[in-house]
Amino acid sequence: MALLKDKVCVITGGAGSVGLASARLFLEEGAKVMLVDLTDAALKRATGNLSGNVTSIAADVTRADSTRAYIDATVAKCGKIDVLFSNAGNPGASAPLAAYPEDVFDHTMAVHVRGAFLACKYGLPQMNDGGSIIVTSSVAGIRAGGAGNISYITAKHAQVGLMRVVAKAAAPRGIRVNSLHPGPIDNEFQTNIEQAMGKMMGIDATAMFNQMIPLKRHAKPEEVARSALYLASDMSSFVTGTTLLVDGGMAG
């Protein structure tokens, strides 16, 4: 039987590489998927690459009214939620502490941390018992970060604290809450981070990361999606409050 047969799954950051790969895999496993991203144009491109029971809505995950709107639209269209995948993110900026832009710090925290908080706050009451919440953090939320991308690293650590608090709150209903921690991924998002980091540090950041990863390469989005499927499905039925690394051994 399909692992997510008739399960209602919400994926924020759904037009990005991990969101899109996860949506494709969830659909293959029988899910009803609501894709959420910032613009209709991005969602139109994403859904054009998918087949199955998929719909979409544009929303700003940093806003409470926008979060309520995508949650309510999902319930109205598909029914109560079984899987809430808070995956939206932005890259922050690479800069020394003394020169770090405060507006970038605030916006990065808003997208990653406030976005995940609002998803949990408004999503949890609209979930079926026994469901799953997944928060995309990063290997940067586990290991000691470098001195460059301060807002991103800080946000990724903060998401772990949020996940653990929500896991305790959701446990009486059998709802599992975990965070997913990819290492560097071969996608546009990571490329932009590495280019900015490389420019600031005067190095080839992509090569640097590949040397830091024991498996000597970046992850494919589909590899991260398979780990998301594990957390979304009953394969992880006794897993909650934990951090799942998908990093090729980078954090070891």
Image (cartoon, grey):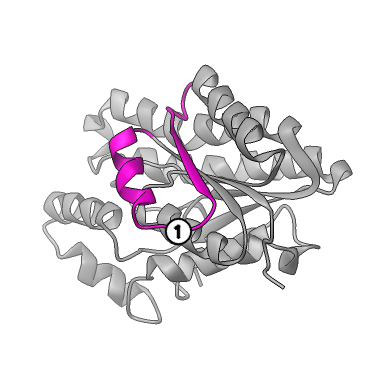
Question: Residue 238: x, y in percent?
Answer: 81, 63
SS for dot 1: loop
Residue at 38%, 43% in the rendered image: 152
Asked if the magenta segment contains residue 57, the reply would be yes
Q: Per the image, is 60 magenta?
A: yes
Q: Is residue 245 left or right of residue 169?
A: left
Other-residue count near label 1 (Cα within 10 Å), few / some / many at <14 / 14–19 / ≥20: few
- Left/right placement of residue 27 relative to residue 199 reads right
Question: Measuring 21% from the left and 72% from the top, which residue is drawn there?
Answer: 207
Image position, residue 35 (x, y; %): 48, 43
Indicate the position of residue 192 as horizontal and vertical percent values: 21, 51
Residue at the outermost bottom position: 215
Task: Answer yes or no: is residue 147 visible.
Answer: no
- Placement of 154 over or under 102, stated as above or below: below
The quadrant of the picture occupied by the N terminus is bottom right
Identify which residue, 93 or 22, lies in the foreground.
22
Q: Residue furthest top?
A: 65
Which kind of residue does numbered mark 1 sit on? Ser
* Image: magenta residue range: 38-63
The answer to whether 57 is drawn above or below residue 82 in the figure is above
- Residue at position x 68%, y 57% in the image: 242
**Along the line of sight, the residue nearer the viewer: 186 or 67:** 67
Percent of width and height locating residue 76: 64, 30
Residue that carries the numbered disc 1 in the rendered image = 51
Which residue is painted at 78% across and 42% down in the image? Answer: 128
The reply to whether residue 183 is in sight is yes
Q: Residue furthest right?
A: 172
Residue 98 image-quadrant placement: top left
Residue 166 vertical placement versus 67 (above, below): below
Total count of labels = 1
Towards the viewer: 110 or 94: 110
